[in-house]
């Protein structure tokens, strides 16, 4: 094997965000950009004995430049001494499926090529992240080490070899390294069979139950067709937009009410299916809509936690739950009733990893439409739909009935997220700094008729390893439990996205049918006033309301 050593220099701006490194395709494809980052990953995570005998999993969401990037990664992996690479057929592996493959095959880790819910195509976004041996996103100590290597890198190691045929299942070779092209769907489907009662779900569909699953021309199409249509017998056409395309068909593969409006309209029609669902670019997020009712992600997490015992994998109960800090407190009330712990973590799935590995939690979720359990170490869109289907099959009620009964039992957390996208970065930072400067004086004040009980910049101490993560979001918590949270997102590739989270609790069932934006109107106005959002940004309204 002819190892080629290519001199290189550090490239600025390679600090991974909440879920890896994301930039425009054009930036990744330029010069040694991708190679610099991949080599930095290997330099940062290299064991004392090197990578001899170890397996690396590689796959992506099929977006533009995915195939070319995978060929680069394979060559660099070979030069760095990996014994084997497992790569999804056609370069495809959903993010939860990649986690599944890492865990089931005892791999050292994996490189997932995805920018998740961000747009694709030649002018779109690209991304890459390293997942560790537990199948989960690398923790901060590893991403910090990777970033440090990007600042000192001087050499890329690669090999001269022909491209791997990513369409052909089976073993091939790059020098001394074995490359196995695997069925991208098989391991994942096998895991889902162990978690859920497929016979009961087949009976549900045989009885006339209707599902509409929008794969948004993204990675979950093959998984959804294999499970819902072939395994469970849902009619052909249940999965729409099911062919992964490099540009996601020109759409934005983010399963929210703006970008999945076709699904929303379908579910609000008189002849709507029983359940509507969607997933995102790399398959780790989910959208749940019942006939005539949208279930916000925070509420979905709470309802899944309250009913998880209806699926075989969770029949003995759950050990605990966790949510990201900006996620509503709806699941907290379920945990309290179940008598299990509820952990509040920073945003980013990597913060759930230690809790899952230690057996402290079984379910976890984020308000950004990510939900998961201890079956993998990533959020999982198709899994969430299967758990909803299991609950519907067992309870024989509609989504709307389940939601109304849940709120009657636990109360309702009215909750919204307002996104201001692609803001000028200095403006966004000045805005959040202005809010941060006010925090020390706000506790004890009365604002919009509510007393401020807590005003801080959220800090998290991991209960498993004691690591501390600071500056995780500015929050105001009122004595009635209402909250306003400000946070700059780490998932964009240009400018900055300001996310404002607003929440209040309503215990009176007679007041559970309000429009969410109306129910939160006074807090929405206060959030704008405190941060001077319209004045500072010139935006009269958010770009996306969830």
Image (cartoon, rainbow, N blue to C red):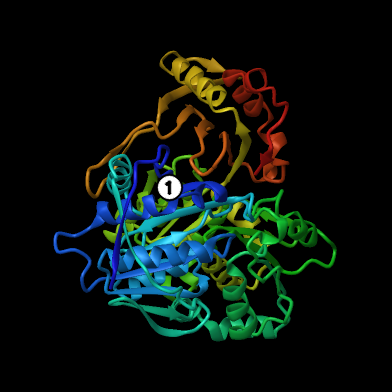
Up the image or down, 483 lies above or below 348; here it is above
Give residue 263's position: percent from left, percent from top. Answer: 74, 60
Relative horizontal placement of residue 463, taking residue 504 as reference (left or right): left
Q: Residue furthest right?
A: 270
The secondary element bearing badge 1 is classed as loop
As drawn, is 109 to the left or to the right of 417?
Answer: left
Residue 40 or residue 302, whichever sits in front: 40
Give the quarter of the figure containing the N terminus: bottom left
Q: Quadrant of residue 208?
A: bottom right
Q: Residue at x 48, y 61 (%)?
A: 69
Q: Residues within 10 Å of mark 1 (few under 14, many from 20)?
A: some
User: Who is closer to the viewer here, 498 or 206?
Assistant: 498
Q: Is residue 152 visible?
A: yes
Residue drawn at the location 14% of the way across and 64% of the way down: 49
- Residue 322 in picture, x, y percent from top left: 40, 51
Q: Which residue appears farthest toward the left when viewing the image?
A: 48
* Observer able to see residue 339: no
Residue located 54% across and 32% down the image: 482
Q: Is residue 259 above or below residue 482?
A: below
Question: Percent position (x, y) of residue 467?
Answer: 25, 42
Residue 273: quarter of image: bottom right
Q: How many labels were placed on the picture?
A: 1
- Name the quadrant of the C terminus: top right
Q: What residue sits right under mark 1 in the picture?
A: 348
Q: Position of residue 338 (x, y in %)?
A: 41, 57
* Residue 399 figure quarter: bottom right
Return the residue nearer the eye: 404 or 497.
497
In the rendered image, the vertical position of residue 178 relative to residue 298, given as above or below: below
């Amino acid at each position: 094997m002819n190892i080629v050593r290519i001199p290189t220099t550090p490239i600025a701006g390679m600090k991974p965000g909440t879920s890896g490194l994301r930039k425009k395709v054009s930036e990744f494809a330029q010069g040694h950009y991708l190679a610099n980052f991949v080599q930095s990953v290997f330099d940062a995570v290299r064991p004392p004995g090197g990578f001899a005998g170890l397996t690396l999993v590689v796959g992506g969401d099929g977006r533009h430049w995915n195939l070319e990037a995978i060929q680069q990664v394979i060559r660099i992996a070979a030069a760095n001494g990996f014994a084997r690479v497992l790569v999804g057929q056609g370069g495809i592996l959903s993010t939860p499926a990649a986690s599944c493959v890492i865990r089931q095959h005892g791999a050292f880790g994996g490189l997932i090529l995805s920018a998740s819910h961000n747009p694709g195509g030649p002018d779109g976004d690209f991304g890459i992240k390293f997942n560790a041996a537990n199948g989960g996103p690398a923790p901060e100590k590893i991403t910090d080490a990777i970033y440090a290597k990007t600042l000192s890198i001087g050499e890329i190691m690669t090999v001269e070899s022909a491209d791997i045929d990513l369409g052909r299942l089976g073993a091939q070779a790059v020098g001394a390294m074995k490359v196995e092209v695997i069925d991208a769907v098989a391991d994942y489907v096998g895991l889902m069979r162990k978690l859920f009662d497929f016979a009961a779900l087949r009976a549900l569909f045989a009885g006339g139950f209707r599902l509409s699953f929008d794969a948004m021309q993204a990675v979950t199409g093959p998984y959804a067709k294999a499970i819902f249509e072939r395994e469970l017998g849902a009619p052909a056409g249940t999965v729409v937009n099911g062919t992964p395309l490099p540009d996601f068909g020109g759409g934005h593969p983010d399963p929210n009410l703006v970008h999945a409006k076709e699904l929303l309209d379908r579910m609000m029609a008189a002849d709507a299916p029983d359940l509507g669902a969607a997933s995102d670019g790399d398959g780790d997020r989910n959208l749940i809509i019942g006939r005539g009712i949208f279930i916000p992600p925070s509420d979905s997490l709470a309802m899944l936690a309250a009913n998880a015992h209806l699926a075989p994998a969770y029949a003995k109960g759950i050990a605990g739950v966790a949510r990201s800090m900006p996620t509503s407190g709806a699941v907290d009330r379920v945990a309290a009733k179940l008598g299990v712990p509820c952990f509040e973590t920073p945003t980013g799935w990597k913060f759930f990893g230690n809790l899952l590995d230690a057996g402290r939690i079984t379910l976890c979720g984020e308000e950004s439409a990510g939900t998961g359990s201890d079956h993998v170490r990533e959020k999982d869109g198709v899994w969430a739909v299967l758990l909803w289907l299991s609950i519907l099959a067992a309870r024989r009620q509609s989504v709307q009935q389940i939601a109304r009964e849940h709120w009657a039992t636990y109360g309702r957390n009215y909750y919204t997220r307002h996104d201001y996208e692609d803001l000028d970065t200095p403006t966004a930072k000045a805005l959040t700094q202005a809010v941060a400067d006010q925090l020390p004086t706000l506790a004890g004040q009365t604002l919009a008729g509510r007393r401020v009980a807590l005003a801080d910049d959220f800090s998290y101490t991991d209960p498993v390893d004691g690591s501390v993560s600071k500056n995780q979001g500015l929050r105001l918590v009122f004595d009635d439990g209402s909250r306003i949270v400000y946070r700059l997102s780490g998932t964009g590739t240009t400018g900055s996205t300001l996310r404002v989270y607003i929440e209040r609790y309503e215990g009176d069932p007679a007041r559970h049918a309000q429009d969410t934006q109306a129910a939160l109107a006074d807090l929405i106005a206060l959030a704008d006033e405190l941060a001077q959002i319209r004045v500072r940004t010139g935006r009269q309204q958010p770009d996306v309301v969830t």
